[in-house]
Image (tube, rainbow, N blue to C red):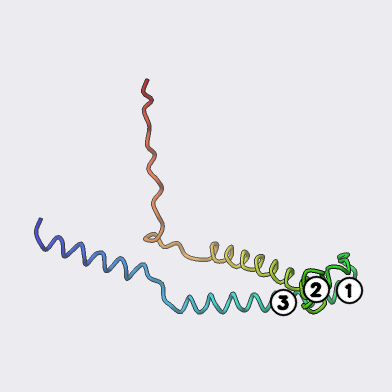
């Protein structure tokens, strides 16, 4: 084992670390997406509640509009927050599904399948 082999290993380690890192701009894009989906969920919840009052799609009891555990909240805020949360979860799941289908598979980042080990039974 010479010193050059050790240096090559360190160089390979540095190169692998460089390749593995993502561009920091993707963190910003993810933050904007999450913020946008949250705001969109709130606006969707407002629309859904107002349309539900006119159309009568769902029967929402009056006790849900102003719950006893949170009297300081405006009327209907709890329902809007719950609907916005479910919209956020659903839309984020759809976004992840779309990304999983569309994104190219980078063979360097994909782990190889695990080796199958046969265990001999001993008596």
Dot 2 alpha-carbon crowd within 10 angstroms: few under 14, some 14 to 19, many 20 or more: some
| Rendered view: 120 above or below 109 | above
In the drawing, what numbered circle is on residue 53? 1
Query: Residue 77 occupies which quadrant of the picture?
Result: bottom right
C-alpha separation, residue under disc 2 versus residue under disc 3: 10 Å
Q: Position of residue 39 (x, y in %)?
A: 67, 79
* Disc 2 element: helix
Dot 3 alpha-carbon crowd within 10 angstroms: few under 14, some 14 to 19, many 20 or more: many
C-alpha separation, residue under disc 1 versus residue under disc 3: 17 Å
Q: Residue at x 52, y 78 (%)?
A: 29
- Total labels: the figure holds 3
CB contact under 8 Å: marks 2 and 1:
no
Q: Quadrant of the C terminus?
A: top left
The residue pinned by badge 3 equals 42
Tell which residue pokes out farthest to the left in this image: 2
Q: Is residue 10 left or right of residue 71?
A: left
* Disc 1 element: helix
Q: Position of residue 1 (x, y in %)?
A: 10, 55
Q: Is residue 69 left or right of residue 30?
A: right
In the drawing, what numbered circle is on residue 20? none
Q: Position of residue 34 (x, y in %)?
A: 59, 74
Q: In front here: 61 or 88?
A: 61
Q: Residue at x 36, y 60 (%)?
A: 108
Dot 1 alpha-carbon crowd within 10 angstroms: few under 14, some 14 to 19, many 20 or more: few
In the drawing, what numbered circle is on residue 48? 2
Query: Residue 105 occupies which quadrant of the picture?
Result: bottom left
């Amino acid at each position: 084992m010479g010193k050059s082999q050790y240096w090559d290993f360190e160089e390979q380690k540095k190169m692998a670390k460089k390749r593995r890192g993502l561009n920091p701009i993707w963190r910003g894009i993810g933050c904007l997406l999450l913020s946008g989906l949250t705001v969109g969920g709130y606006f969707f919840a407002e629309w859904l509640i107002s349309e539900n009052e006119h159309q009568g799609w769902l029967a929402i009891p009056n006790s849900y509009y102003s719950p006893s555990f949170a009297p300081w909240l405006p009327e209907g805020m709890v329902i809007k927050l719950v609907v916005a949360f479910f919209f956020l979860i659903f839309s984020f799941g759809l976004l992840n599904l779309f990304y999983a289908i569309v994104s190219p598979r980078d063979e360097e980042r994909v782990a190889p399948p695990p080796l199958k080990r046969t265990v001999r039974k001993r008596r």
